[in-house]
Amino acid sequence: MTRRKPEPMDPDEPPINDEKAKRSFTERLSAQREKARAGFERLKEHLGQEREETREMFEIYNRAMEGDATREEIKRANEQFGDLLRLAGMGTFFTLIPGSTLLLPVAVAGANKVGIRLLPSAFSEDQDPEVPTDEPS
Protein backbone atom coordinates (compact mmCIF):
# COMPACT_ATOMS: atom_id res chain seq x y z
CA MET A 1 0.00 0.00 0.00
CA THR A 2 1.50 3.32 -1.02
CA ARG A 3 1.11 6.48 0.96
CA ARG A 4 0.50 9.77 -0.72
CA LYS A 5 2.33 12.82 0.42
CA PRO A 6 0.11 15.39 2.03
CA GLU A 7 -0.37 18.41 -0.14
CA PRO A 8 1.32 21.56 1.15
CA MET A 9 -0.92 23.97 2.99
CA ASP A 10 -2.07 27.16 1.35
CA PRO A 11 0.30 29.88 2.60
CA ASP A 12 -2.56 32.40 2.79
CA GLU A 13 -4.53 30.32 5.32
CA PRO A 14 -3.53 30.60 8.98
CA PRO A 15 -1.98 27.47 10.44
CA ILE A 16 -4.18 25.20 12.53
CA ASN A 17 -2.10 25.78 15.65
CA ASP A 18 -2.85 29.50 15.55
CA GLU A 19 -3.72 30.62 19.10
CA LYS A 20 -6.37 33.07 17.91
CA ALA A 21 -8.22 30.30 16.02
CA LYS A 22 -8.05 27.99 19.03
CA ARG A 23 -9.36 30.70 21.35
CA SER A 24 -12.18 31.56 18.95
CA PHE A 25 -13.19 27.90 18.69
CA THR A 26 -13.17 27.39 22.45
CA GLU A 27 -15.17 30.59 22.98
CA ARG A 28 -17.80 29.43 20.51
CA LEU A 29 -17.86 25.99 22.11
CA SER A 30 -18.23 27.54 25.55
CA ALA A 31 -21.07 29.77 24.34
CA GLN A 32 -22.90 26.74 22.97
CA ARG A 33 -22.32 24.87 26.22
CA GLU A 34 -23.89 27.71 28.19
CA LYS A 35 -26.80 27.86 25.76
CA ALA A 36 -27.36 24.10 26.12
CA ARG A 37 -27.09 24.32 29.91
CA ALA A 38 -29.68 27.12 29.98
CA GLY A 39 -31.98 25.05 27.75
CA PHE A 40 -31.70 22.02 30.02
CA GLU A 41 -32.34 24.17 33.10
CA ARG A 42 -35.48 25.53 31.47
CA LEU A 43 -36.59 22.00 30.53
CA LYS A 44 -36.00 20.92 34.14
CA GLU A 45 -38.17 23.79 35.40
CA HIS A 46 -40.97 22.95 32.96
CA LEU A 47 -40.91 19.26 33.86
CA GLY A 48 -40.91 20.18 37.56
CA GLN A 49 -43.99 22.30 36.99
CA GLU A 50 -45.67 19.40 35.18
CA ARG A 51 -44.78 17.11 38.11
CA GLU A 52 -46.45 19.50 40.58
CA GLU A 53 -49.53 19.86 38.37
CA THR A 54 -49.76 16.07 38.06
CA ARG A 55 -49.54 15.65 41.83
CA GLU A 56 -52.36 18.17 42.19
CA MET A 57 -54.35 16.30 39.51
CA PHE A 58 -54.18 13.06 41.49
CA GLU A 59 -55.25 14.85 44.68
CA ILE A 60 -58.24 16.35 42.87
CA TYR A 61 -59.23 12.97 41.41
CA ASN A 62 -59.01 11.43 44.89
CA ARG A 63 -61.26 14.15 46.29
CA ALA A 64 -63.62 13.74 43.32
CA MET A 65 -64.03 10.04 44.12
CA GLU A 66 -65.09 11.08 47.63
CA GLY A 67 -67.38 13.76 46.20
CA ASP A 68 -65.39 16.70 47.60
CA ALA A 69 -64.05 18.28 44.38
CA THR A 70 -65.59 21.23 42.58
CA ARG A 71 -66.32 21.32 38.85
CA GLU A 72 -63.50 23.84 38.33
CA GLU A 73 -61.01 21.55 40.07
CA ILE A 74 -62.12 18.58 38.00
CA LYS A 75 -61.81 20.67 34.85
CA ARG A 76 -58.24 21.68 35.85
CA ALA A 77 -57.39 18.03 36.59
CA ASN A 78 -58.75 16.95 33.20
CA GLU A 79 -56.62 19.60 31.48
CA GLN A 80 -53.56 18.25 33.29
CA PHE A 81 -54.47 14.73 32.19
CA GLY A 82 -54.47 16.06 28.62
CA ASP A 83 -50.98 17.48 29.25
CA LEU A 84 -49.83 14.03 30.39
CA LEU A 85 -51.13 12.55 27.15
CA ARG A 86 -49.27 15.25 25.21
CA LEU A 87 -46.04 14.37 27.04
CA ALA A 88 -46.56 10.68 26.30
CA GLY A 89 -47.15 11.50 22.64
CA MET A 90 -43.99 13.57 22.47
CA GLY A 91 -42.01 10.74 24.06
CA THR A 92 -43.37 8.33 21.47
CA PHE A 93 -42.57 10.85 18.73
CA PHE A 94 -38.95 11.10 19.89
CA THR A 95 -38.37 7.36 20.18
CA LEU A 96 -40.14 6.04 17.10
CA ILE A 97 -39.53 8.60 14.36
CA PRO A 98 -35.98 9.04 13.02
CA GLY A 99 -34.95 12.68 12.89
CA SER A 100 -37.74 13.72 15.23
CA THR A 101 -35.49 16.20 17.03
CA LEU A 102 -35.46 18.18 13.80
CA LEU A 103 -39.13 17.62 12.99
CA LEU A 104 -40.60 18.40 16.41
CA PRO A 105 -40.19 22.20 16.25
CA VAL A 106 -41.71 22.20 12.77
CA ALA A 107 -44.60 20.02 13.95
CA VAL A 108 -45.26 22.27 16.96
CA ALA A 109 -45.19 25.44 14.84
CA GLY A 110 -47.49 23.89 12.23
CA ALA A 111 -49.92 22.64 14.86
CA ASN A 112 -50.03 26.08 16.51
CA LYS A 113 -50.96 27.67 13.17
CA VAL A 114 -54.04 25.44 12.86
CA GLY A 115 -54.99 25.81 16.53
CA ILE A 116 -53.71 22.49 17.90
CA ARG A 117 -51.60 22.52 21.07
CA LEU A 118 -48.96 19.79 21.04
CA LEU A 119 -46.94 20.96 24.03
CA PRO A 120 -48.11 20.68 27.64
CA SER A 121 -49.19 23.88 29.39
CA ALA A 122 -45.93 24.14 31.35
CA PHE A 123 -44.07 24.58 28.06
CA SER A 124 -46.37 27.36 26.89
CA GLU A 125 -44.66 30.76 26.68
CA ASP A 126 -47.71 32.66 27.98
CA GLN A 127 -47.64 30.57 31.19
CA ASP A 128 -44.01 31.57 31.91
CA PRO A 129 -43.89 33.47 35.24
CA GLU A 130 -40.95 35.59 34.03
CA VAL A 131 -43.04 37.08 31.21
CA PRO A 132 -45.22 39.98 32.37
CA THR A 133 -48.89 39.85 31.44
CA ASP A 134 -51.05 42.73 30.24
CA GLU A 135 -53.90 41.83 32.59
CA PRO A 136 -54.80 44.48 35.18
CA SER A 137 -54.21 43.50 38.81
Image (cartoon, helix red, strand yellow):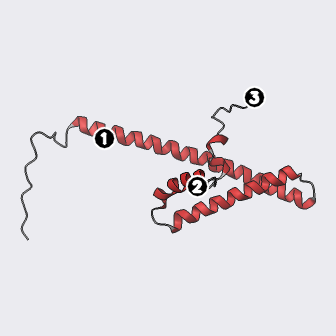
Which of the two discs, 1 and 2, labels the residue nearer the N terminus? Answer: 1
SS for callout 3? loop
Query: Where residue 103 appears, x then y in whole percent?
Result: 48, 58
Query: Where residue 4 appears, x then y in whole percent?
Result: 7, 61
In this figure, which residue is indicated by the disc labeled 3?
A: 136
Give the quadrant of the N terminus: bottom left
Other-residue count near label 3 (Cα within 10 Å), few / some / many at <14 / 14–19 / ≥20: few
Task: Select label 2 or label 3 by which is in front.
Answer: 2
The outermost residue toward the bottom is 1
In this figure, which residue is indicated by the disc labeled 2?
A: 111
The residue type indicated by label 3 comes to Pro
Foreground residue among 14 and 77: 77
> Label 1, label 2: how many angstroms apart (C-alpha)?
37 Å
Which of the two discs, 3 and 1, labels the residue nearer the N terminus? Answer: 1
In this figure, which residue is indicated by the disc labeled 1?
A: 25
Foreground residue among 127 and 48: 127
Query: Where residue 105 appears, x then y in whole percent?
Result: 51, 53
Q: Residue at x 84, y 51 (%)?
A: 73
Task: Select label 1 or label 2 by which is in front.
Answer: 2
The residue type indicated by label 2 comes to Ala
The residue type indicated by label 1 comes to Phe
> Label 2, label 3: how many angstroms apart (C-alpha)?
30 Å
